[in-house]
Amino acid sequence: MPDLKPVALMLLLLPVVGFAQTTQQKGLEIAQAAKAFDKGFTDFTANMVMTLKNKSGKTSKRLIRMRTLEVEGDGDKSLSIFDEPADVKGTAMLTYTHGLKPDDQWLYLPALKKVKRISSRNKSGPFMGSTYAFEDLGSQEVEKYSYNYLRDEPCGDWTCSVIERFPAYKHSGYTRQVVWIDNEGYRIVKAEYYDRKKSLLKTLNATDFNRYLGQYWRPGKMDMVNHQTGKSTLLEWTDYAFKTGLTDRDFRSQTLMRIR
């Protein structure tokens, strides 16, 4: 009779090999869990103060109203409306986020009295002079990236999973991003952005989180620092309101010129 011990040993090892999780799989699962945790908010509005700071420390402020609509089976729709200062009053930015398909973005400039469509090749450009790029403004759909889990480490009062994500869409200004996501509420508390030369370009730090409707975490402050230019942009969020009744009609490019 043949020796069955090697066969039995192989059978015992098969489940272990079959269920071994790669760092890529773990990174993807964390991103999927974060997206699922935030699902169901329907829509929200908020007010924002954008503070621009140049290399010498001089600052300027802009007041913005934000609207976001959750879209089933696709990325979110978002609208930014500038109220102050006078030179940008009435400017409006509309974004339809998608997965691997290029995001649709339109910018209304009241001085020109025209709606400008943002080219998919120009998403790495700065938004309204800030350190945020156009591609930073849409919802971060899972399909937009491939992932790699790096480690767990403390991040303030929480423990964060640190993952890399690599843009899978064309014309991104980044080669990779390193993101800190807390393991309790799936809040993105920090992100590093690396440019096309693979050098560190920007760092985002999000703080002052509050939970809404018992589930949905949103930051009170988001500070984006550009290490190469010395500029930074602080976003301060207030007056969050969820499930306000927004619909697709509130997010039409044809109506940007009439938005108040």
Image (cartoon, rainbow, N blue to C red):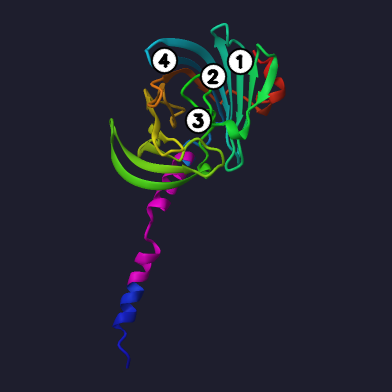
Q: What is the quadrant of residue 233 in the picture?
A: top left
Q: CA distance from mark 3 to mark 4?
A: 18 Å
State whether residue 64 is above or below residue 72.
Answer: above
Q: CA distance from mark 1 to mark 4?
A: 20 Å
State yes or no: residue 146 in magenta: no
Residues under labels 2 and 1: Cα distance? 10 Å
Q: Which residue is mark 4?
A: 53
Between 191 and 219, the residue placed more toward the observer is: 191
Looking at the picture, which amino acid does disc 3 mark? Answer: Asp
Q: Earlier in the sequence, mark 1 or mark 4?
A: 4
In the image, which residues are magenta? 13-35
Quadrant position of the N terminus in the picture: bottom left
Tell me if mark 3 has few (under 14), some (14-19) or many (20+) residues whose alpha carbon lies within 10 angstroms of its own.
few
Which amino acid, by three-letter code, is at mark 1?
Thr
Residue under circle 2? 128
| Residue drawn at point x = 44 percent, y = 47 percent | 147
Distance from Cα at disc 4 to Cα at disc 2: 13 Å
- Give the residue displayed 31% in from the left and 76% down from the top: 9
> Mark 1 touching mark 4, by CB under 8 A?
no
Crowd around label 1: few <14 · some 14–19 · many ≥20 (10 Å):
many
Spot occupied by residue 203 in the image (x, y as percentages of width and height): 38, 29
Q: Which mark is residue 51?
A: none
Q: Which residue is mark 3?
A: 136
- The residue singled out by tag 1 in the image is 91
